[in-house]
């Protein structure tokens, strides 16, 4: 190994199958040579994805990342591959897909870079990740038109870019039959982001096929293990795409989502349920849910930020009116 922190022979207890689902993975020791990259994933998420690949990856399928941005998650996935104990994986690469099209002002604010909207930022990605380049294969791609060999299994599918039912359908149809029951992990980076509630809705429709594995108490990542084979038909997500929700169906699907969750993870997803109810026309029920949320500083900061978006404030006005004092200065 070329990193200065050597892995222990035994994985951290928090990452083991059957360990407590909710964790910030503070027992994971990261190598000291992972390059600094602008990005939004938390320290806990960095520890988790590194430990997932370095300790639980078996080398029976590929590691695939959908949505790399400048490569922060990519370098932790790649370092995990480099440091893996699994036999025969040293030649493996993280297969990362992104459109690599710059989004403009908000991307500049988050990254500290000065690029124009629409710029190709793949050169910046390659620059930030160059020290781990032997373990990375990056490709420009549209998530609705991904290309993947039918005979190449996938062991870890890291979903960051696809955050809507439409994009999840496109991505999951590509990889559904490549995922291996009893082996594959599906890692959803923004599962806990309340405005991205279509992600947990989609995974709730797969409840007979997947099982909650890990939930980050910091950041937004939740991962699942695949229990039964997936088909392209399983990931049509029609109920989400067509917004086929009455009050009973909303309550049923969110009971499935919330049941295994606890602590701050549960509070974030209760906010997601409130947004879904409100968008579906059930304002009173949405307000009733938001009243039960323990509004910690992180959640309050999120709501304050969303309130700055006129379209979101208009779409969810009853909720913003209810929590107005909570998020005011």
Image (tube, rainbow, N blue to C red):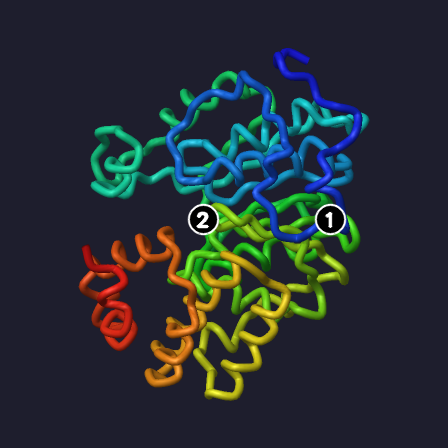
| Picture coordinates of residue 45, whole percent (x, y) | 53, 40
Res 8 quadrant in image: top right
Q: Nearer the viewer, residue 86 or 4?
A: 4
Depth check, mark 1 against mark 2: the one in front is 1
- Residue at horizontal 59%, vertical 49%? 187
* Left or right: residue 325 compared with residue 238: left
| Picture coordinates of residue 247, whole percent (x, y) | 47, 87
Image quadrant for the C terminus? bottom left
Seen in the picture, residue 259 relative to 112 is either above or below; the reply is below
Q: Nearer the viewer, residue 57 or 238?
A: 57
Q: Is residue 132 visible?
A: yes
* Left or right: residue 25 compared with residue 59: left
Q: Nearer the viewer, residue 15 or 196?
A: 15
Res 1 quadrant in image: top right
- Between disc 1 and disc 2, whose residue precedes? 1
Q: Nearer the viewer, residue 65 or 273?
A: 273
Seen in the picture, residue 30 relative to 65 is either above or below; the reply is above
Categorize mark 1 by other alpha carbons within 10 Å: few (<14), some (14-19), many (20+): few
| Picture coordinates of residue 322, whole percent (x, y) | 27, 74
Q: Is residue 166 visible?
A: no
- Residue at horizontal 64%, vertical 16%? 5
Seen in the picture, residue 230 relative to 33 is either above or below; the reply is below
Q: How many marks?
A: 2
**Residue annotated with mark 1:** 19
Categorize mark 2 by other alpha carbons within 10 Å: few (<14), some (14-19), many (20+): many
- Residue at horizontal 64%, vertical 68%? 206
Secondary structure state at the residue bearing disc 2: loop
Secondary structure state at the residue bearing disc 1: loop
**Residue annotated with mark 2:** 161
| Picture coordinates of residue 274, whole percent (x, y) | 40, 73
Q: Does the CB distance between marks 1 and 2 fall below 8 Å?
A: no
* Left or right: residue 89 compared with residue 214: right
């Amino acid at each position: 190994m070329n990193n200065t922190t050597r892995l222990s022979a035994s994985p951290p207890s928090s990452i083991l199958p059957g360990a407590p689902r909710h964790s910030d993975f503070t027992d994971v020791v990261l190598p000291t040579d992972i390059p600094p990259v602008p990005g939004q994933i938390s320290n806990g998420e960095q520890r988790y994805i590194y430990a997932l690949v370095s300790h639980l990856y078996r080398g029976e399928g590929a590691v695939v990342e959908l949505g790399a941005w400048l490569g922060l998650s990519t370098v932790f996935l790649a370092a995990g591959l480099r440091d893996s104990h699994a036999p025969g994986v040293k030649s493996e690469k993280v297969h990362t897909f992104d459109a690599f099209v710059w989004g403009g002002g908000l991307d500049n604010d988050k990254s500290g870079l000065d690029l124009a909207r629409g710029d190709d930022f793949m050169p910046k990605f390659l620059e930030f990740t160059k020290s781990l380049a032997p373990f990375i294969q990056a490709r420009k791609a549209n998530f609705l038109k991904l290309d993947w060999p039918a005979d190449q299994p996938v062991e870890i599918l890291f979903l960051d870019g696809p955050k809507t039912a439409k994009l999840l359908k496109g991505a999951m149809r590509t990889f559904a039959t490549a995922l291996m029951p009893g082996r594959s992990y599906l890692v959803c980076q923004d599962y806990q982001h309340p405005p991205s509630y279509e992600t947990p809705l989609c995974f709730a429709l797969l409840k007979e096929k997947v099982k909650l594995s890990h939930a980050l108490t910091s950041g937004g990542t939740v991962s699942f293990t695949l229990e039964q084979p997936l088909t392209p038909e399983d990931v049509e997500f029609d109920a989400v795409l067509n917004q086929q929700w009455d009050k009973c169906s909303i309550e049923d699907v969110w009971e499935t989502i919330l049941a295994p969750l606890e602590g701050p993870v549960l509070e974030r997803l209760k906010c997601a349920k409130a947004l879904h109810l409100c968008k579906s026309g059930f304002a009173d029920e949405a307000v009733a849910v938001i009243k039960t949320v323990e509004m910690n500083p992180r959640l309050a900061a999120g709501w304050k930020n969303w309130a700055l978006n006129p379209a979101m404030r208009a779409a969810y006005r009853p909720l913003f009116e209810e929590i107005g004092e909570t998020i005011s200065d």
